[in-house]
Amino acid sequence: HRLAAGAAGAGQLVDVAAMRQPLHALIVDWTVLLPLLRRRVPLNQLGDQIGMDERTINRLARGEIKDPRFGQGVRLLDLAVDLLDAEEWRRVRQAAATLRGAG
């Protein structure tokens, strides 16, 4: 397992391998992931980094938009890998499992 230092907290390690899933299983509940990211990155900076306006980010976070464009989703996930801690990733994985079960 590869570990990466998480920017979320000094000295915290995030198990990167545990975050990886087969592509067919990659389901993201953006209504869980985005609020976690918005706690760490101001909304205007988040929009600049992923190429999405603030209104669209908010709509995605509220579930009014189901999925971002592919490139935007990849950039969101890249930011999440860099910023979220292990507990936050547990919440993201748990929400994704719930979506898979409902689908």
Image (spheres, rainbow, N blue to C red):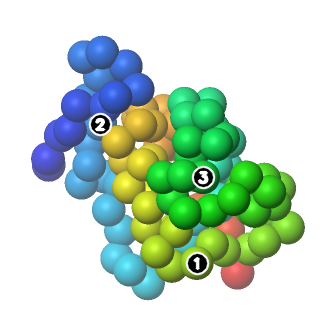
The three-letter code of the residue at mark 2 reads Val
Q: Secondary structure at mark 1?
A: loop
Q: Name the residue that disc number 1 marks.
A: 69
Give the mark, 1 or 2, whose residue is nearer the N terminus. Answer: 2
Q: Please tell me which residue is depicted at 64% across the width and 43% down the height of the picture.
A: 44
Quarter of image, res 64: bottom right
Q: CA distance from mark 1 to mark 2?
A: 26 Å
Q: Residue furthest left?
A: 2
Give the mark, 2 or 3, whose residue is nearer the N terminus. Answer: 2
Q: Which mark is residue 47?
A: 3
Where residue 101 sits in the image (x, y, percent)? Answer: 66, 72
Front label number (1 vs 3): 3
Q: Please tell me which residue is depicted at 38% across the width and 80% down the height of the picture.
A: 23
The three-letter code of the residue at mark 1 reads Arg
Q: Please tell me which residue is depicted at 61% across the width and 34% down the height of the picture.
A: 42
- Vertically, is 79 above or below 6? below
Q: Name the residue that disc number 2 marks.
A: 14
Q: Secondary structure at mark 3?
A: helix
